[in-house]
Image (spheres, rainbow, N blue to C red):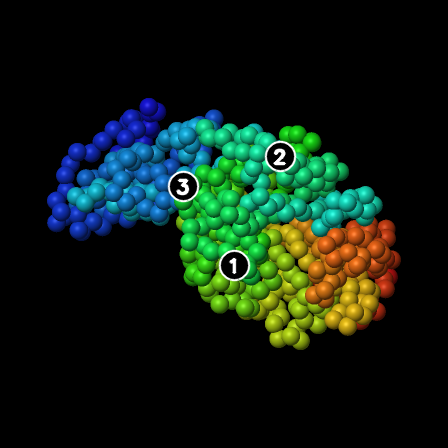
Amino acid sequence: MCSLVLWAAGGMTAYGENTGAASETVSETEAAAVTADGSITSCLIIGSGDTIEVKAQSNGQMENTDSYLYLFELKPYEDSIGGRTDYAAWAEGGTSATFSLSLNRGSASDRLYSKFVLAVKTADGYQEISKPHYITNPEVVAPNQAPYKAPLSKKGLQMEVSQIGDAFQLGVKHSSVNIAFHQILGEGIDYEYDGKVYHFSKPVIESYDETISAMSNKDITVTAIILNGWNPATPDLVIPGTTQKSNVFYYMPNVTTEAGFEETRAIAAFLAERYSGANPDYGKVSNWIIGNEINNQQWNHMGATDITNYVQTYQDAFRVFYTAIKSTSANDRVFFSLDYNWHNEADGQLKYGGKDIIDYFNSIANVQGQMDWGVAYHPYPCPMTDAIFWDDANTGLITNDLSSPVVNFINLNVLTDYLATTAFQKPNGEVRNIMLTEEGFTATNANGDDLSMVQAAAYAYSYYLVDSNPYIDAYILSRQVDAPSEVNMGLAFGLWSCDMSKPDQIIPQQRRKLWEVFRDIDNSKKTLETTEFAKSVIGIDKWSDVIPDFRWKYQEQ
């Protein structure tokens, strides 16, 4: 039994854990008039990393209680203490208290992922008087404390592994890999976590090893996108009651049940350890995106629900991944993903505005424990089938303010200025990390016309906008090579065209103008010369006329 040092209003007292401190009884009549209210103000791992310190406040109104404050531990899938009596710690009532308890790291009673609530005792049992609060600094126990390695430029590309030599020639600095969360369990790799053994598919994991190590070993910063698809063999990874739908691509990760939480936690921890950079044969993931375009349930389905419940459910799952990642590699970055619909298309049940997702996510975290979360944004042209984004205001969906239905490249400052405000800053006061992780410009239209010069000009303009914006860390273009299925929808995004006679494969056929622009865009000696053609396509004389704080302004003629 660990010893608890409890700071309360009356001073310091040492108690044993769950010793039944209070024996006073409270009448049922009195219990109905409890006025105690409180909050947990911090929940931190301290010292050598084996102790949790929880600080709480209350209004000091302990009438009709036994005059003590109690701290209960809940798992992410638990909504309330219910009729439980197994409190983790207690203190004398007052306006403030500090509870100290063991982390129990690596054991079946591991508290790293737990949340805590403050309670008082009435004649009817224990009554919660605070919202739950999670540990907010899991990074202090991470074995990998290496600083985040910032790439030399923001230039990124969704690469084809078979074309990795081409990517090196292009000077790619960022790339991404989709990890099919629902397909990695299997046989061949055993992994023990908190006393349980989990089994992973050796061929699937080795395929990720090959891809990730090939990129990270060449100093390409790798972003992993965690996607939870439908797999009847892994039902615990999907929220109970969710049904498979033909128009849904991915599903909300499940931490709402004990089995779902434990399985999700173990997979998240396995991935974080596997791609921590400790083994160069596995590679290093530096950025993690949990889900895709979560403001649209087509990509993160749980069923029709209001935004409060949706964001709370997502954040509970996000926090499990966050804790697993940050407790392994302290300076990895963790993001949620949004499409360009800032307010557009939101119905409040299956689709939500990107701004509202940010607002709700932040407000919930303010109460339950802030994290170092970031935003992975997808600012495609509007519509995506038209590469010319600089006239998107003509759609009526683009304005340069927070009421804009859509936020894309031409008004990207709406997103970055909003996240730069004090309300959204990280706990350390810095602006949150923002990456653009999926966007592209088509080189053809519905008629099959060759618009490759427009595509290249659009990329040049968009890259300069991003490169001159101090709040964006990376810009990952989609794609290296056209995908036949996307070309059939009028979306020829590639630096290379593809062989359309082989629709089930992605085979490069011919370089486009975009290839050259992409290669030179971050080269100070070549960038302006290579993009000179784009000015006439866009209809401008100087880049600095349309790009605030243009990075290469003093090199313009």
Kind of residue at badge 3:
Glu
Which element type, helix, strand or loop, lies under badge 2? helix
Q: Which residue is mark 2?
A: 202
Which mark is drawn over residue 158?
none
Tell me how far mark 3 sits from mark 1, CA to CA: 25 Å
The quadrant in which residue 484 appears is bottom right
Q: Nearer the viewer, residue 288 or 551?
A: 288
| Left or right of residue 304, residue 525 in this image | right
| Left or right of residue 350, residue 164 in this image | right
- Mark 3 closeness class: few <14, some 14–19, many ≥20 residues within 10 Å: some
Q: Position of residue 395 (x, y in %)?
A: 64, 75
Question: Looking at the rendering, in which quadrant would you find the C terminus?
Answer: bottom right
Q: Residue at x 68, y 58 (%)?
A: 439
In this view, 537 is above or below 184: below
Q: Which residue is mark 1?
A: 245
The earlier-in-sequence mark between 2 and 3 is: 2
Tell me how far mark 2 sits from mark 1, CA to CA: 29 Å
In this view, 169 is above or below 531: above
Q: Residue at x 77, y 67 (%)?
A: 444
Tell me how far mark 2 sits from mark 3, CA to CA: 26 Å
- Tell us which disc is closer to us: 3 or 1: 1
Q: Which residue is mark 3?
A: 258
Question: Looking at the rendering, in which quadrant would you find the N terminus?
Answer: top left
Check if mark 3's residue and mark 1's residue have beta carbons within 8 Å. Answer: no
Q: Could you tell me how many numbered marks the image carries?
A: 3
- Tell us which disc is closer to us: 2 or 3: 2
